[in-house]
Amino acid sequence: MLTGFRYRLAPTGEQAGLCQVYGDICRAVWNTGLHQRREAVRRWQRGQDLPFCGYHLQARQLAEAKTEEEWLKAAPSHILQQTLRDLDRACRDHGTFNVRWRAKGRWKPSFRFPAGARVIVQRLGRKWGRLKLPKLGWVRFRWSRSAKGTVDAPGTHVRQKAGLNRAILARGWHGFKLACQNAARRSATRIVEVNPAYTSQTCHPCGHVASENRESPSVFRCGACGYRAHADVNAARNTRARGWTSPSG
Ligand SMILES: [Zn+2]
């Protein structure tokens, strides 16, 4: 086991935003996992013979889901696996139907990096230290034992932050669209929807369309003219150009 010292992390605004997103993803994984377990128990009670829904089955299914769901990939895999382990433990200790949902308002976003995760700790001075966490990078913390923190080294609790990512996760794309329309009404901005087909495969300067133009998920390189750019930037320029010429706009 780890020693019991707790340290309060001092994340940057960007890191706090990421922590919020990770917390939201863990909450979604917890709730989905708990729902699945309850359904499995109900079906078992009705006499249906099914594979036991435990940690290993869920971890395998989570790994499969991660190949398709972009929003799941945003979080370090360690903390998602840890969420399923914690769920497994809670269900075995308290019973599947006594384990609570992680409601958005009630549950304080938190996640844990298991002991196997690569966490590097450095001392910066008498009072400050920093630790390197997967995907978050270096996070500073106060090197003080007296801090009755809400944060320990292998996990963080971060203040609620109403970020864009959070809104997308919580409300899905439909909610995101509504939020954009509301913001547009207040700021006299017009929203134009465009057909996104081939925006990621089209070379913005020359118009050449080919799936080979994508060198990697992040790099765009045109097979015709050699133009090279971040894939998201190239796609965004195509999207903006379509907006200007779109009949709905
Ligand atoms: Zn080109």
Image (tube, rainbow, N blue to C red):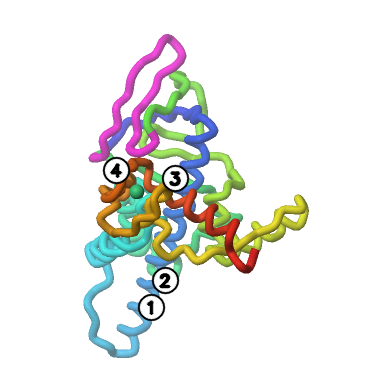
Residue named by callout 3: 233
Expressed as whole percent of the image width and height from the top left, the position of residue 110 reads: 46, 46
Give the quarter of the image for residue 125. top left
Q: Residues within 10 Å of mark 1 (few under 14, many from 20)?
A: some
Residue named by callout 2: 35
Residue 107 in view: yes
**Mark 4 Cβ inside 8 Å of ligand 1:** yes
Distance of label 4 from label 1 (alpha carbons):
53 Å
Q: Nearer the viewer, residue 89 or 43?
A: 43
Q: Residues within 10 Å of mark 2 (few under 14, many from 20)?
A: some
* Amino acid identity at mark 4: Gly
SS at mark 3? helix
**Mark 3 Cβ inside 8 Å of ligand 1:** no
The answer to whether marks 2 and 1 mark residues whose Cβ atoms lie closer than 8 Å is yes
Q: Nearer the viewer, residue 1 or 209?
A: 209
Residue named by callout 4: 226
Distance of label 2 from label 1 (alpha carbons):
6 Å
Q: Image check: 241 left or right of 77?
A: right
* Amino acid identity at mark 1: Glu
Residue named by callout 1: 39
Expressed as whole percent of the image width and height from the top left, the position of residue 6 reads: 43, 30
Distance of label 2 from label 3 (alpha carbons):
39 Å
Q: Residues within 10 Å of mark 3 (few under 14, many from 20)?
A: some
Image quarter hosting the N terminus: top left
The answer to whether marks 4 and 3 mark residues whose Cβ atoms lie closer than 8 Å is no
In front: label 4 or label 3:
4
Q: Which mark is residue 242?
A: none
SS at mark 1? helix
SS at mark 2? helix
In front: label 2 or label 3:
3
Region of the chain picked out in magenta, as a range = 116-136
Residue 124 falls within the magenta-colored stretch: yes
